[in-house]
Image (cartoon, grey):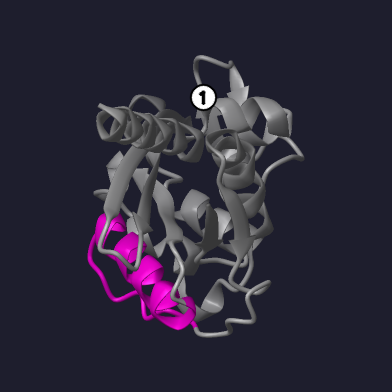
Amino acid sequence: MRIVLASNNAHKLEELRAILTTLGMEVVSQKEMGITVEPNENGTTFEENSYIKARTIMDCCGLPTIADDSGLMVDALNGAPGIYSARFGGEKCRTDRERLEYLLERMQDVPDERRTAKFVSVITLLTPEGKKIVARGECPGVILHAPKGENGFGYDPVFYVSEEACTFAQLPAERKNRISHRARALAAFAEKVRKERENADK
């Protein structure tokens, strides 16, 4: 089955391909399909925005489409930046580094015990026939006071994962791709697909 990814993010494409090819799914980016439309992400939850992305691109290509909406939720900031993770800080924060520094600035007086956070990913698959599969994955962690590590992107350098005893940015890509919020959402998604196929074969 050929599936279009409602994104041109190379990181997402790589992670999705790694998992979905094991399910016999060929994943192509919207760019590869010649689609330049930008979905209007005006939802209020990861679920809503994931659906909006998938629906918008599916309407353009007429093929099964998968979308991911993900972000960082910090407890001390009442769940911010959340769905606005890629736009945190507004116009004054145009790069990943500027958004990361803005986050640390907002949290400079937050004590260690209150720096808990989680990365969230919601994946939605829609098909022209009306099928909808949604899966959510979360990875808990702690926000450090300063960046550590050179790998990853976004907030990875300050997101410390206790089970790994390091930040996302200190993990090799293949390890991060096994434990990340997106990896967990993909695993849940893959399980739903397998169960659906098993039921169809009965």
Secondary structure category for the residue under label 1: strand
- Which residue is located at x 61 percent, y 40 percent? 21
- Asked if the stretch drawn in magenta spans residue 60, the answer is yes
In the displayed structure, does residue 167 sit left or right of residue 122?
A: right
Q: On the image, which quarter does residue 186 sit in?
A: top left
Q: Residue 18, image x and y in percent?
A: 64, 38
Secondary structure mostly taken by the magenta-highlighted segment of the chain: helix
Residue positioned most to the right: 150
**Does residue 145 appear in the picture of this structure?**
no
Mark 1 sits on what residue? 161
In the displayed structure, does residue 32 sit left or right of residue 202?
A: right
> Looking at the image, which is closer to me, 79 or 54?
54
- Which residue is located at x 63 percent, y 75 percent? 33
195 is higher (above) or lower (below) than 9:
above
8 is higher (above) or lower (below) than 180:
below
**Does residue 180 appear in the picture of this structure?**
yes
- Which residue is located at x 71 percent, y 34 percent? 173
Q: What residue type is labelled 1?
A: Val
Q: Residue 120, image x and y in percent?
A: 38, 43
Q: Residue 87, image x and y in percent?
A: 46, 69
Q: On the image, which quarter does residue 152 sit in?
A: top right
Q: Residue 82, image x and y in percent?
A: 34, 55
Number of disc labels: 1
Residue positioned most to the bottom: 37
2 is higher (above) or lower (below) than 60:
above
**Magenta stretch?**
38-61
> Looking at the image, which is closer to me, 66 or 158?
66
In the displayed structure, does residue 85 sit left or right of residue 35?
A: left
- Asked if the stretch drawn in magenta spans residue 168, the answer is no
